[in-house]
Amino acid sequence: MASTRREFLALAGAGMMLGASGRLWAQVSTTVGDWQVTSVSDGHLSLPRGF
């Protein structure tokens, strides 16, 4: 049975989503005095044009 390009792309996309589902966010927590600070990042960094 021959696969089509559309089927391949659908399976590849589903596989990437399942494989990356646990790695979409980075989370770091620290405690400062009585406060807990939590930072959540998606890995996207924006820099100013003059940098």
Image (cartoon, rainbow, N blue to C red):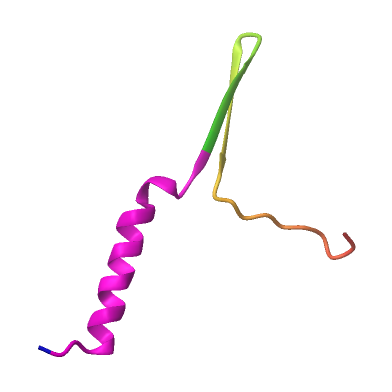
In magenta stretch: residue 19: yes
Report the quarter where the C terminus lies.
Answer: bottom right
Q: Decide if residue 14 is on the left or right side of residue 2.
A: right
* Residue closest to the far left: 1
Indicate left or right for 32 with 21 as reference.
right
The residue that appears at 52% across and 41% down in the rendered structure is 26
Q: How many marks?
A: 0
**Residue 41 picture location, percent across and down:** 57, 44
Predominant SS of the magenta segment: helix
Residue 44 in the image, given as x and y percentages of width and height: 62, 55
Q: In this picture, is 24 found above or below 40?
A: below
The quadrant of the image that shows the N terminus is: bottom left
Question: Which stretch appears magenta?
Answer: 2-26
Locate residue 34, reporting x and y percent.
Answer: 61, 9
Q: Which residue is drawn at the image coordinates 66% and 9% (left, top)?
A: 33
Instruction: Compare residues 32 and 28 and report the one nearer the observer.
Output: 28
The residue sitting at the top extreme is 34
Q: Is residue 6 above or below residue 32?
A: below
Write the residue at 82% across / 60% down. 48
Relative image position of residue 4 (x, y in whole percent): 22, 89
Residue farthest to the front, as pictured: 1
Is residue 20 one of those drawn in magenta? yes
Q: Residue at x 43, y 47 (%)?
A: 23
